[in-house]
Structure formats: C-alpha cells, structure tokens
Image: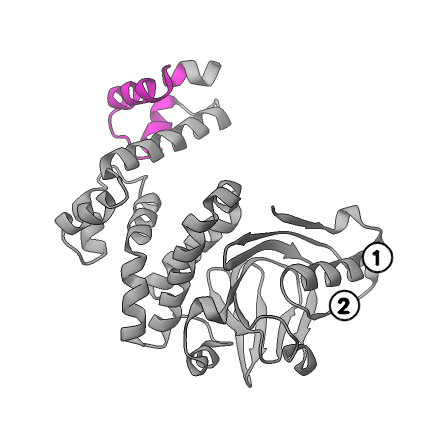
Amino acid sequence: MPVILNTDEVEERDRAEFVHEALGATMVPIELHWPGHRRSVAAHGVVTDLGDLTVCAGRTTALRVERTTALARDSMEPSIFINVQLSGSSMVLQHDREAVLRPGELVMYDSTSPYTLLNDTGMTGNFFRIPHSALAMPHDMIRAACAVKLGPGHPVTSLTHDYLRRLAADPALTTAVNADLVGHPSIELIRAVIATHLRADELAAEPMAATLQMRILEYARRHLHDPGLSAEQIAAAHHISVRYLYKVLAASGISLADWIRTRRLEACRQALAADAAVAVGAVARRHGFSDLSSFSRAFRAEYGMSPSEWRKH
C-alpha cells in the first residue's frame, strides 16, 4: 500500500516536522534543514515497497538533507539509494566526493556513511532504496560508486534512467501484484549500471543477462513511434541474434509483433481520447502505424470499434 506524503494537508507550522517524520519512517532517518521561513516548506511524494526495492517519487522546495555520523550508525538495515534527477539540480556529498546532478543523471549514496544532499532551488526526482543484502555487491565497490554520477552518457545508464522514471510514475507497476515482477529485475538493472560504471565486467555480466528481456522491451517501448521498428533492429541494438531475441521473449510467452502492436494501439487509444483536434491518421502515424487502413482494422479488432467511434463514445 503506497504511503502518500503531502504537505498541503498539514498546517504550515507543522510541515517541516511532518516531512522529517514521514521520511524517517518510510525511507531513512535523516536531518532536514529548510532555508527561509517555515511557510516555504512544501513536499509531495509517494513511497511504495516492491519487495526489496523501495520507490519514492517526489518533489520538494529547497532543502538540505543530512545523514549524520550518529544516524549512519543506527539500526537501519544497511542500504544504498539511487537518486534519479527529473528537474532542477542537486548535489550529493559523501566520502569526500561531490556530484552535481542534473535531469537525466543518476547518483548513488550509502546509508552506512554520513552524507549530505543539497537542493537550493527545489527539485523533482525519484529515489530508490535497496538493502546491501539484495544488491549483493562488495562494500568497497559500493563505496567507490557513491557520490559520483553513474555512467554518464552510457547507453545502459540512459535506459535505466528512463526505466526507473517510468516505474516510479506508473501506479500500475507499483501494486502489490506486480511487486515481485518488477522489484528484483529493477535491482538487477541498477546493479548492472553500478558494475558497468566501475568496469566490473564479471559482476556486470549476470545482471545484464538477467535483465535482457526487460532491456529489449524497454528499447521497443522507446521506439514504438518508428514504423520501421523490427526484430532485426532490436537484436542489433542488444548485440544478439534475432533467433536469440525471440528465444528470450518466448521464455515469458511474449510475441514481439503482438507486444508492439498492442502497445501502439494503447498509445493511440489514449491519444484519441486526449485530443479530438488531432486527425486519426496523424495519431496513427505518430505512434508507428504507417498505413491508416491497417491501423483501423487492428484498432477495431482490439477494441470492438473504429478509432472514430472510440473518440465519440
């Protein structure tokens, strides 16, 4: 059951303490320092547990977060945090290092050592907590990866950022039913990013293999708008054969063509409902359908009515 944090529902004088207690109970005990008057305190977030992975999607006004030496020695289960920056900028300081984070970048920090998070202007971001025991990486590697931007410009980092952003934003993915389905693979993907950043090839190999299906589908999702999207293109992007691509998907009963068509149709269905001013043909082309008649037939087969009828119903 997600925990919702919303300072709009709290008296202004109580907001700072409310946020402090809520984050301490759901994520990690920390000290918070808000610049200016207490009236400037504003924070909104949703915290969800997906097995060993805890997800916090939130936004806040300017603040400084500190996990002090005393707090770092508390009884909390040793954990790492991944910060996915969506807007604004922030700084992470740990182990005498600092990383300035901007949208599209990832950084890691560790609960077992003191750290400081600085946010001078307000930000929107997603935070992911993983116990050391679930991450299963040597402590010296964890330490080496803290307070540095993880794999800037690396395609695995870019994919992971997009995947984690979608995971935190989609309520359907963060339900109890889906917890086991997405929790463990997400941790494996994060582990792969860390290992790749540290060039720990042997350590990266296992999670890269374990997350291949996830990465294939995420790549396909990001290219649904391309009418030329094909098994050959996807296989080449992942340095595997088309035959192996089909084998990986078949292990979960996934037909690539059906999966792509279904996702495209769903995107079109949502677009048709969202903006009646956009022509049906334009919607179809925008989401990867090059032929209007084929799109209309597929849409009717999926939803029992034509695109125009759907828009009117």
Task: For marks 1 and 2, give the one nearer the viewer.
Answer: 1
Decide if residue 122 is on the left or right side of residue 300: right
Judge by depth and name the residue closer to the eye, 200 or 83.
200
Predominant secondary structure, magenta span? helix
What residue occupies the far bottom of the structure in this picture?
Answer: 96
Look at the numbered discs 1 and 2 and tell me whether their residues touch, using CB distance below 8 Å: no
Tell me the SS state at disc 1.
helix
Q: CA distance from mark 1 to mark 2?
A: 15 Å
Give SS at disc 2: loop
Q: Is residue 10 magenta?
A: no
Residue at the location (31% across, 76% down)? 200
Residue type at mark 1 is Asp
Q: Is residue 140 visible?
A: yes
- Disc nearer the start of the sequence (1/2): 1
Which amino acid type is shown beneath numbered disc 2?
Answer: Pro
Q: Is residue 275 visible?
A: no
Q: How many marks?
A: 2
The residue that appears at 68% across and 77% down in the rendered structure is 71
Which percent across, then down, holds residue 140?
44, 83
| Tag 2 residue | 35
Q: In the rendering, which numbered label is found on residue 14?
A: 1
Residue under the point 29% across and 36% down: 259
Q: Position of residue 143 (x, y in %)?
A: 48, 81
**Percent of width and height locating residue 188:** 38, 62
How packed is label 1: few (under 14 Cα within 10 Å), some, or many (20 or more)?
Answer: few
Point out residue 50 in the picture as x, y percentages from the top left corner. 51, 53
The magenta stretch is 280-308
State left or right for residue 190 relative to residue 21.
left
Left or right: 211 in relation to 180: left
